[in-house]
Protein backbone atom coordinates (compact mmCIF):
# COMPACT_ATOMS: atom_id res chain seq x y z
CA UNK A 1 0.00 0.00 0.00
CA UNK A 2 2.75 2.42 0.89
CA UNK A 3 4.63 1.78 -2.34
CA UNK A 4 1.54 2.76 -4.36
CA UNK A 5 2.06 6.38 -3.22
CA UNK A 6 -1.74 6.73 -2.98
CA UNK A 7 -3.52 8.00 0.12
CA UNK A 8 -5.08 5.29 2.29
CA UNK A 9 -8.65 5.20 3.54
CA UNK A 10 -8.08 3.93 7.06
CA UNK A 11 -11.29 2.55 8.58
CA UNK A 12 -11.40 1.43 12.21
CA UNK A 13 -14.43 0.21 14.14
CA UNK A 14 -15.11 -0.41 17.79
CA UNK A 15 -18.40 -1.61 19.24
CA UNK A 16 -19.56 1.96 19.87
CA UNK A 17 -17.87 4.19 17.28
CA UNK A 18 -16.20 4.34 13.88
CA UNK A 19 -13.25 6.38 12.71
CA UNK A 20 -12.37 6.97 9.07
CA UNK A 21 -9.30 8.85 7.88
CA UNK A 22 -7.47 9.58 4.67
CA UNK A 23 -3.79 9.08 5.49
CA UNK A 24 -0.57 9.62 3.53
CA UNK A 25 2.63 7.74 4.31
CA UNK A 26 5.77 9.80 4.84
CA UNK A 27 9.25 8.68 5.96
CA UNK A 28 8.85 10.59 9.24
CA UNK A 29 5.41 9.06 9.87
CA UNK A 30 1.87 8.97 8.55
CA UNK A 31 0.04 12.25 7.98
CA UNK A 32 -3.73 12.41 8.39
CA UNK A 33 -5.21 14.56 5.62
CA UNK A 34 -8.88 14.37 6.61
CA UNK A 35 -10.96 12.43 9.11
CA UNK A 36 -14.51 11.71 10.22
CA UNK A 37 -15.82 10.08 13.38
CA UNK A 38 -19.28 8.60 13.89
CA UNK A 39 -19.66 10.78 17.02
CA UNK A 40 -19.92 13.74 14.63
CA UNK A 41 -23.19 12.36 13.29
CA UNK A 42 -24.89 13.02 16.62
CA UNK A 43 -23.21 16.39 17.09
CA UNK A 44 -23.63 17.85 13.60
CA UNK A 45 -26.49 15.90 11.98
CA UNK A 46 -28.86 15.13 14.88
CA UNK A 47 -28.14 11.37 14.68
CA UNK A 48 -30.26 9.71 17.37
CA UNK A 49 -29.24 6.09 16.84
CA UNK A 50 -26.15 4.27 18.13
CA UNK A 51 -22.88 5.39 16.49
CA UNK A 52 -21.42 1.92 16.02
CA UNK A 53 -23.87 0.26 13.62
CA UNK A 54 -23.73 -0.29 9.84
CA UNK A 55 -25.80 2.80 8.91
CA UNK A 56 -23.55 4.96 11.12
CA UNK A 57 -20.49 3.43 9.42
CA UNK A 58 -21.92 4.23 5.99
CA UNK A 59 -22.74 7.81 6.97
CA UNK A 60 -19.26 8.26 8.49
CA UNK A 61 -17.71 7.09 5.19
CA UNK A 62 -20.02 9.44 3.28
CA UNK A 63 -18.97 12.35 5.51
CA UNK A 64 -15.29 11.47 5.06
CA UNK A 65 -15.73 11.22 1.29
CA UNK A 66 -17.38 14.64 1.13
CA UNK A 67 -14.57 16.18 3.17
CA UNK A 68 -11.87 14.49 1.11
CA UNK A 69 -13.39 15.67 -2.17
CA UNK A 70 -13.62 19.23 -0.84
CA UNK A 71 -9.83 19.08 -0.31
CA UNK A 72 -9.18 17.70 -3.80
CA UNK A 73 -8.60 14.11 -2.65
CA UNK A 74 -10.62 11.95 -5.01
CA UNK A 75 -9.00 8.52 -4.72
CA UNK A 76 -7.48 6.24 -2.12
CA UNK A 77 -6.88 2.60 -1.30
CA UNK A 78 -8.60 0.84 1.60
CA UNK A 79 -6.55 0.02 4.69
CA UNK A 80 -8.43 -2.26 7.11
CA UNK A 81 -5.41 -2.97 9.30
CA UNK A 82 -5.65 -6.24 11.19
CA UNK A 83 -9.43 -6.47 10.96
CA UNK A 84 -10.77 -9.62 9.35
CA UNK A 85 -12.31 -8.79 5.96
CA UNK A 86 -15.89 -10.03 6.38
CA UNK A 87 -18.46 -9.41 3.64
CA UNK A 88 -20.82 -6.57 4.61
CA UNK A 89 -18.80 -5.54 7.69
CA UNK A 90 -18.81 -2.02 9.11
CA UNK A 91 -15.44 -1.22 7.54
CA UNK A 92 -16.92 -2.00 4.14
CA UNK A 93 -19.93 0.19 4.95
CA UNK A 94 -17.42 3.05 5.49
CA UNK A 95 -15.90 2.19 2.11
CA UNK A 96 -19.35 2.23 0.45
CA UNK A 97 -20.06 5.65 1.97
CA UNK A 98 -16.81 7.11 0.64
CA UNK A 99 -17.51 5.65 -2.82
CA UNK A 100 -21.08 6.99 -2.81
CA UNK A 101 -19.66 10.43 -1.94
CA UNK A 102 -17.70 10.26 -5.22
CA UNK A 103 -14.27 8.87 -4.31
CA UNK A 104 -12.53 6.28 -6.45
CA UNK A 105 -11.35 3.38 -4.31
CA UNK A 106 -10.51 -0.04 -5.80
CA UNK A 107 -12.77 -2.72 -4.31
CA UNK A 108 -14.73 -5.87 -5.00
CA UNK A 109 -18.49 -5.16 -5.10
CA UNK A 110 -19.14 -8.47 -3.33
CA UNK A 111 -17.74 -7.22 0.00
CA UNK A 112 -19.97 -4.14 0.23
CA UNK A 113 -23.15 -4.31 2.34
CA UNK A 114 -26.32 -4.02 0.29
CA UNK A 115 -28.27 -0.75 0.10
CA UNK A 116 -31.04 -2.01 2.39
CA UNK A 117 -28.53 -2.78 5.13
CA UNK A 118 -26.67 0.55 4.96
CA UNK A 119 -30.02 2.33 5.11
CA UNK A 120 -31.01 0.38 8.25
CA UNK A 121 -33.63 -1.87 6.67
CA UNK A 122 -32.51 -4.79 8.83
CA UNK A 123 -33.00 -2.72 12.00
CA UNK A 124 -36.45 -1.55 10.90
CA UNK A 125 -37.54 -5.08 9.98
CA UNK A 126 -36.36 -6.47 13.32
CA UNK A 127 -38.14 -3.65 15.19
CA UNK A 128 -41.40 -4.30 13.32
CA UNK A 129 -41.18 -8.02 14.01
CA UNK A 130 -40.53 -7.44 17.72
CA UNK A 131 -43.29 -4.83 18.02
CA UNK A 132 -45.80 -7.36 16.67
CA UNK A 133 -44.53 -10.43 18.51
CA UNK A 134 -43.31 -9.09 21.86
CA UNK A 135 -43.89 -5.40 22.64
CA UNK A 136 -42.13 -5.67 26.03
CA UNK A 137 -38.91 -6.88 24.40
CA UNK A 138 -39.32 -4.19 21.72
CA UNK A 139 -39.48 -1.53 24.45
CA UNK A 140 -36.37 -2.94 26.13
CA UNK A 141 -34.24 -3.49 23.01
CA UNK A 142 -35.05 -0.13 21.46
CA UNK A 143 -35.37 1.96 24.63
CA UNK A 144 -32.53 4.32 23.61
CA UNK A 145 -34.12 4.93 20.21
CA UNK A 146 -37.54 5.51 21.73
CA UNK A 147 -36.17 7.79 24.46
CA UNK A 148 -34.77 10.06 21.74
CA UNK A 149 -38.08 10.10 19.84
CA UNK A 150 -36.95 7.76 17.07
CA UNK A 151 -39.24 4.92 16.01
CA UNK A 152 -36.92 2.06 15.03
CA UNK A 153 -39.50 0.61 12.65
CA UNK A 154 -39.15 3.84 10.61
CA UNK A 155 -35.36 3.74 10.78
CA UNK A 156 -34.66 3.42 7.05
CA UNK A 157 -36.45 6.70 6.33
CA UNK A 158 -34.56 8.37 9.15
CA UNK A 159 -31.19 7.20 7.78
CA UNK A 160 -32.23 8.52 4.37
CA UNK A 161 -32.88 11.97 5.85
CA UNK A 162 -29.52 12.07 7.65
CA UNK A 163 -27.83 10.92 4.42
CA UNK A 164 -29.44 13.82 2.61
CA UNK A 165 -28.19 16.20 5.32
CA UNK A 166 -24.65 14.84 5.05
CA UNK A 167 -24.70 15.16 1.25
CA UNK A 168 -25.95 18.76 1.53
CA UNK A 169 -23.27 19.70 4.08
CA UNK A 170 -20.40 21.83 2.87
CA UNK A 171 -17.82 19.07 3.23
CA UNK A 172 -15.57 21.39 5.19
CA UNK A 173 -14.07 20.08 8.40
CA UNK A 174 -10.99 18.29 9.61
Image: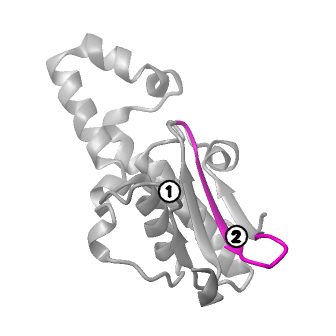
**Of marks 1 and 2, which one's residue comes earlier in the chain?**
1
Residue at image position (24%, 15%) is 135
Question: Which residues fall within the magenta stretch?
Answer: 16-30
Q: Quadrant of residue 125?
A: top left
Viewer-closest of 155 and 38: 38
Q: Quadrant of residue 71?
A: bottom right
Viewer-closest of 163 and 65: 65
Q: What is the x, y in percent for residue 5?
A: 65, 88
Front: mark 1 or 2? 1
Viewer-closest of 5 and 37: 5
Residue at image position (46%, 54%) is 83
- Judge from the rendering whether residue 123 lies leftward or rightward of residue 1; answer left or right: left
Q: Is residue 26 above or below residue 129?
A: below
Magenta segment includes 36 = no
Residue position for label 2: 171
Mark linked to residue 82: 1
Amino acid sequence: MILSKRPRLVARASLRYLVAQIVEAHPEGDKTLVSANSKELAKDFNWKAPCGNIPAAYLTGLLLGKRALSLGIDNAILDIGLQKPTKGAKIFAVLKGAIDAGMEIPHDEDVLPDDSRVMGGHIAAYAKQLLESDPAVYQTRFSKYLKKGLKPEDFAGYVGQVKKDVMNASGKGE
